[in-house]
């Protein structure tokens, strides 16, 4: 296993993530992402991790949706990867920061055309009349951008989670799981183990 507690946690994550990908773990880049609203009520959903940006875990979304509004008010967030076939969990706590416009545009350009049109069509998290009315709007936008390079919508982009705590959890028999925790103090990481 490519984990050495003496190593930097980001480097350890990257090695484990690569291992998960090489082993064909389904949805290895799916992470649950928790935010809290202004009444301190939490909500959680899956988003896709899209690589490290300046040593922060990146994901992309609609900047007007529920999670973005919650991050705007309180950018403390938590995320968890779970790779069941490997019996591994990685927990991240930290701060969500918007990536640069250029970083969002670069990633948007790599997305499938339908996803690009969807980003223009969807007012994420808002109530809609029906799926038919949504599809109608999608078709209109498809025509509008026919034979064109679709630009990144102004309301769409990425975040990077700047971690302040990362826990690597390895499932062991008898529930004697191993938990390796890194905590950031200033620029340095401290390390400790946690009881299962
Ligand atoms: C496997 C999977 C991957 C997803 N990836 C993303 C993603 O990268 N970005 C995103 O905004 N929503 C993604 N979603 C949809 C979210 O779970 C969620 O429905 C959406 O972001 C709206 O959340 P919100 O209303 O809390 O803002 C994904 C859902 C699943 C099941």
Image: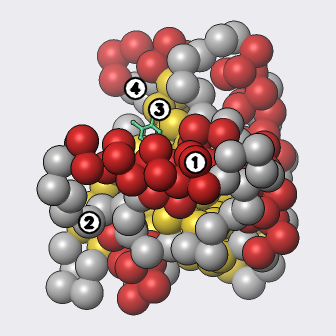
* Mark 1 residue crowding within 10 angstroms, few (<14) / some (14–19) / many (20+): few
Q: 178 or 68, which lies in front?
A: 68
Residue depth check, mark 3 versus mark 4: number of the one nearer the observer: 3
Q: 189 or 35, which lies in front?
A: 35
* Mark 4 residue crowding within 10 angstroms, few (<14) / some (14–19) / many (20+): few
Q: Residue 75: x percent and y percent?
A: 48, 80
Q: Disc 2 or 1, which lies upstream in sequence?
A: 2
Q: Residue 134: x percent and y percent?
A: 31, 49
Image point 39% across, 88% down: which residue? 73
Q: Disc 3 or 4, which lies upstream in sequence?
A: 3
Circle 2 sits on which residue?
126
Quarter where residue 115 is shown = top right
Report the Cα–Cα distance between label 3 and label 1: 40 Å
Disc number placed over residue 176 in the picture, else none: 4
Q: Secondary structure at mark 3?
A: strand
Q: Residue 118: x percent and y percent?
A: 50, 49
Q: Disc 2 or 3, which lies upstream in sequence?
A: 3
Asked whether the beta carbons under mark 3 and mark 1 sit within 8 Å of each other, the answer is no
Image point 24% across, 42% down: which residue? 132
Residue depth check, mark 2 versus mark 3: number of the one nearer the observer: 2
* Left or right placement of residue 71 versus residue 103 in this view: left
* Mark 3 residue crowding within 10 angstroms, few (<14) / some (14–19) / many (20+): some
Image point 74% across, 84% down: which residue? 186
């Amino acid at each position: 296993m490519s984990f050495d507690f003496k190593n930097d946690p980001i480097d350890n994550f990257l090695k484990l993530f690569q291992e998960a990908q090489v082993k064909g773990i389904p949805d290895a880049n799916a992470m649950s992402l928790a935010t809290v609203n202004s009444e301190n009520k939490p909500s959680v959903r899956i988003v896709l991790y899209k690589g490290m940006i300046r040593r922060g875990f990146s994901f992309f979304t609609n900047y007007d949706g529920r999670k973005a509004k919650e991050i705007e008010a309180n950018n403390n967030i938590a995320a968890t990867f779970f790779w069941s076939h490997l019996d591994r969990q990685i927990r991240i706590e930290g701060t969500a920061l918007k990536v640069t416009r250029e970083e969002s545009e670069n990633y948007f350009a790599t997305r499938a055309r339908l996803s690009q049109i969807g980003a223009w069509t969807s007012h994420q998290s808002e109530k809609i009349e029906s799926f038919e009315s949504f599809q109608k709007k999608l078709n209109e936008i498809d025509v509008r951008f026919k034979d064109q390079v679709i630009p990144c919508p102004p309301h769409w982009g990425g975040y990077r989670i700047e971690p302040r705590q990362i826990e690597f959890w390895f499932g062991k028999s008898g529930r004697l799981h191993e938990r390796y925790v890194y905590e950031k103090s200033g620029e340095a990481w401290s390390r400790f183990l946690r009881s299962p």
